[in-house]
Image: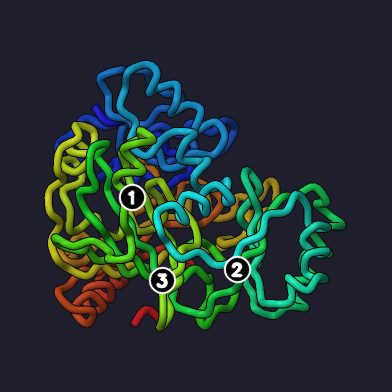
Amino acid sequence: MFVLLNYDGCLLPWAMELDEQGEEVVLVNPKKGESSRSVGEGIVKVLTSIPEDPDAIYVVDSNAGEAGVTADRLWAMGAVVLGGGTKLWKLERDRAYGLQVAKKLGLSVPNTYEFKSPAEALKFLGSSEGKGEFVWKPERDVDARFTFVDPHREALIEFLQFLQAEYPGMPGILQEFVDGTQVSWSCWWNGEEITQWWVLLEDKKFRGRGIGPSTGCEISLVFPLIGREPAFVQGLDEFLRRNQMPPGEYDLSTMVTEDDVYFIEWGPRFGWDMDVVYLPIISLADTLHALALGVPTPEPENLFCLGVRLSVPPYPYLPKKGDQGAKELPIHLSEELSERADVFLYNARKKGNRLVVADEYGLIGVAVGVGGSLDEAVEALEEALEGVHVPELSWRPDYR
């Protein structure tokens, strides 16, 4: 049995895929007091408390706070937890530690400085050592929305002054700004060896040309490296093995320039949107079984996967308290899509015989097109977009 712990809200597509492949699967919406606890109702089996079964395969989409602690407890019980544990949270959000690991692996890392408060960071920027261009990233459990990536030095100083006034105890790092192309390199780790590498290029801004809030991902291009691995990554499997890191997916976010590949941060978990965008070219059930058993994963199809995020208002903003927002808007999906076009839903449930939006936020899902070339993937994506209908539906149109 698969038990999917939907802390971050992105595992409904996996639950639907596993159910379609004939697997016994439970989607758990564990966050208390949130309307998102109804996600998946009427579509797959849904629980709001976590069943404890040492024979189950658990999958986690977050390791923050309760999620990481729960994963550790399930491991101690004797269960297999894919992508879960406080070790992973430390690697991702203790940025100084994560960068130290990257340096030990021989990766190029931009000059990085750690601070206990915005005031310390401002003092550094006023010194001779702090004269360059930097980005600010919060440490540990601080919300990632407080990240500031902008080469404009005066704007960074004003942002840190704002943090100093409103959040004087916020820890963080200043990292030298690198002008390049952001590329993520993700691998599947089965507890014994790395079995597959993926490449991800994504645009995180809600609007085109770098405008608007950063939502994590709005447009995603994903493809596998068949029989290959990134040349700049050496010794990662040895690090994972030596530290007994949990099986799952490990993402290295980098900036690629003409001269080098610079490591930026870790993403050691399953999540948005990549792990939905590649679903059409893998066997999810067989892959998860392989990761849990410590055996090689099935080879994916050697195709390009292009996805765009689907949303309705108030996304990307939180609804006002008491506002129904997008809740219960009808979702209509075409049943005539080809095998290369698909729509995956994050935030849906059944109301009677109809699909509706499950909560107020308005993040609907991802439309995906697959092809042997980028042009073919674009064509399939446009077919997928024509097959989904929700009032006020929007997506980034600049995916070409």
Left or right? Give the position of 343 relative to 210: left
Residue, disc 3 = 261
Residue 279's spot in the image, x, y percent?
A: 24, 55
> Disc 3 versus disc 1: distance between alpha carbons?
16 Å
> Disc 1 versus disc 2: distance between alpha carbons?
33 Å
Residue 132's spot in the image, x, y percent?
A: 68, 77
Mark 2 or mark 3, earlier in chain: 2
Residue 397 position (above or below residue 135): below
Label 2 sits on what residue type? Pro
Left or right? Give the position of 223 relative to 363: left
Residue, disc 2 = 213
- Secondary structure under badge 2? loop
| Observer-nearest of 331 and 143 | 143
- Residue at the location (24% across, 27% down)? 1
Which quadrant holds residue 118?
A: bottom right
Mark 3 or mark 1, earlier in chain: 1
Residue 397 visible to the viewer: no
- Secondary structure under badge 3? strand
| Observer-nearest of 11 and 332 | 11
Label 3 sits on what residue type? Val
- Residue at the location (19% across, 32% down)? 293
Residue 244 position (above or below residue 162): above
Residue, disc 1 = 236
Identify the image quadrant of the C terminus: bottom left
Task: Look at discs 2 and 3 and give the one toward the viewer.
Answer: 3
Left or right? Give the position of 88 relative to 305: right
- Residue at the location (29% across, 46% down)? 237
Which quadrant holds residue 257?
A: bottom left
> Disc 2 versus disc 3: distance between alpha carbons?
26 Å
